Image (cartoon, grey):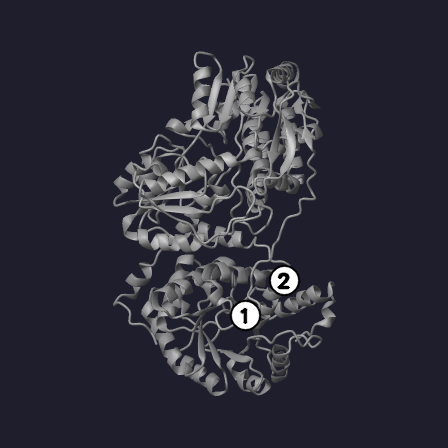
Amino acid sequence: MEIFEYAPAPESRAIVSIRPSYDLFIDGEFVEAKSDERIVTVNPADEEPLAEVAAAGDADVERAFAAARRAYERVWSALPGAERGKYLFRIARIIQERARELAVLESLDNGKPIKETRDVDLPLVAAHFFYYAGWADKLAHAGTAGTRPLGVAAQVIPWNFPLLMLAWKVAPALATGNTVVLKPAETTPLTALAFAEICQEAGLPPGVVNIVTGAGDTGRAVVAHPEADKIAFTGSTEVGRQIARAVAGTDKRLTLELGGKGANIVYDDAAIDQAVEGIVTGIFFNQGHVCCAGSRLLVQESIAEELLERLRARISLLRLGDPLDKNTDIGAINSAAQLARIRELTLAGESEGATGWSPACPLPERGYWFPPTVFTGVTQAHRIAREEIFGPVLSVLTFRTPDEAVAKANNTPYGLSAGVWTEKGSLMLWTASRLRAGVVWSNTFNVFDPASPFGGYKESGYGREGGRHGLEAYLG
Amino acid sequence: MPDTLPGSLRAYLHGLPGVDEVGVRRRAADLATRSVKTRAKRSAIDLAIRMVDLTTLEGADTPGKVRALAAKAVRPDPADPTAPSVAALCVYPDMVATAARALAGTGVGLASVATGFPAGRTSLEVKLSDTRAAVAAGATEIDMVIDRGAFLAGDYRKVFDEIVAVKESCGDAHLKVILETGELVTYDNVRRASWLALRAGADFIKTSTGKVAPAATLPVTLVMLEAVRDYRAATGRQVGVKPAGGIRTTKDAIRYLVLVKEIAGDDWLDPAWFRLGASTLLNDLLMQRTKLTTGHYSGPDYYTID
């Protein structure tokens, strides 16, 4: 009798049609870039090129801002909130209708498993547009300091949740009456370009959303543009610092959502099986390409051995491989550059004396892959406990008392997320109120909702996205 | 044999790690998205058929009904002799003799509910004689119910001692202990009742009688699978799990097999260690099995109504 094993269950990519080449989306049209520089985006699971996109130059960025300014002054800022809301509701519905196509496209361009794009990314993208659509005609009641839009928002987003980060940026900006120039990440431009088509399909007035693809130079031109009234950036702390320096002394508004080194604190009375799930979700969700990942496990020493034994058994069940297979839990690393960084930091972990462990896990021959990895024997001084790895690598530290747990959790330049696992309510509240992190998850991890504000302390950035608080960043 | 336990059962059971309700539901929902197609589906369907405890537990049960169901248990698909037999037939104690004659020499097990099923509201003496009578009539497996009232009142010792006593009166018959999780309600209770039954010597732990809603659910079964996994790791003794009630479609059955595979492990993917208590499920499994072979569905009239 054959043992019950999962057969390959690939989602068909036939639902997606990728053009060989894409132009920029400016003033409601796809227009040829004035810059003749092009970049190629590849499928990280097999390194095959997917499409070529324009790398927008200064002149292209100029055109995008001119279109955004025109749309802001002539149409969008004067439109009643209820009318803006209608466009956003329409966009949200089209996203739902095209969800499967967008999920496949996102998995192809990013490398993340279809299970996540289908069940997490796309539902959240639509939910974000629905949520902010509802606010568009209620801004006077949102409790924000101002109720007037700022103007043109320059938005630069990362590659880890390409369409979701677009939604986090575009939905509140449009709901509040701002127009947008958005630059998607150079390795993941395709869903943003599909979103441009959705804007056309929704009949969004030209110039309200402009999408300029490109790499670092394009991003710099976008955030440095004098017409930008507001800059919203999600990405590395290093680039965030450069932006903050460039904006200093101007009257531009700025929100930064940067790196993290989230602590996941497990007390000895935790619901241990669910804590193990939470640890796995915390660090292996989206291959650990998550700014709020629970990359530092702080476990009470008295249960460390038992917890790690269960954790290793659980990690051994993770299925790594074809991102389009519906049973894949861990997909590909997004780029060769990111893979090199993960390798560099894990080598540093070994050489500094921590012990790495990965399950027996064959990696595909082509593409960018890294096995789920757990480091034990990690101390606060190790680089893998301090620097953001942004990959499927967990650093395990132990603590003896609640005070020590909180002290270690806060002992980082970052402060984006944390998780706490205990069945004791008073200890949960005691701990959560002392953690210097923008999000503290109680007996869960990496759960998102458009109604919940998200953002960091310290070097994880400032400003909040999501929820009522997310409106504040776009109103003056 | 029952384990020796520390003096306070309460301290022991309440010292087990808690179960986070949101987390366990999320894990079960996540595993329910596993995609089982083509050859995986084929092997899952045959395995599921071999795990079925084909059940009739009605006041209206007659010898004729039981004989008919026994025939179906042995040869579920008259049109296709390659369809495997089910694991066991499950009946009320007074039907055991009839069922035993019908199943003699077939290799299909004979399970009898006992101990005042389904409520269990009777004296220990009656429960034990109920059990002994079923075994004497030919039952190879006994499905007992725990005293939920005693459990909820905190009288864990009474529940424990009763399981031990029933186990003794089972002789060689395997003992399945029904927790009736729909009446225990919380996952913490399910975990505690599971460990109580495991420590008392159960050969199987079973979710439900099928007479109380909700019957088997994925999260409850997940918690019970964690218990038998951890119990084997602690003691070396392997115990089976049987969700029963409400499992009606092939899709449901496959979701349970996914749980078994990813929570307890491949060692439990065997009728000796996992059963599905069901009645209408079998025909859906057969229909899906035929569909995989022929490429089309045939109507319900092609499957026996017994």
Name the residue: 74% across, 67% down: B299
Q: Is residue A247 above or below residue B155?
A: above
Q: Name the spot of residue A340 as percent of width and height, x first.
A: 47, 36
**Residue A149 in view, yes or no:** no
The foreground one among A141 and B54 is: B54
Task: Please tell me whether residue B228 is drawn above or below residue B136 in the rendered image.
Answer: above
Q: Secondary structure at mark 2?
A: helix
Instruction: Please give the residue where the numbered disc 2 appears in the rendered image.
Output: B39
Mark toward the start of the polypeptide (1 vs 2): 2
Q: Is residue A404 left or right of residue B78?
A: left
In the image, what residue occupies the spot 55% across and 19% down? A222
Q: Chain of mark 1?
A: B
* Coordinates of residue A185 in the picture (x, y in percent): 55, 29
**Frontmost residue, A347 versus B39:** A347
Q: Which residue is mark 1?
A: B277
Q: Residue A40's image quarter?
A: top right
| Type of amino acid at the residue the image marks with label 1 | Gly
The numbered dot on residue B177 is none
Which class describes the residues within 10 Å of circle 1: few (<14), some (14-19), or many (20+)? many
Work out whether A83 lies above or below A316: above
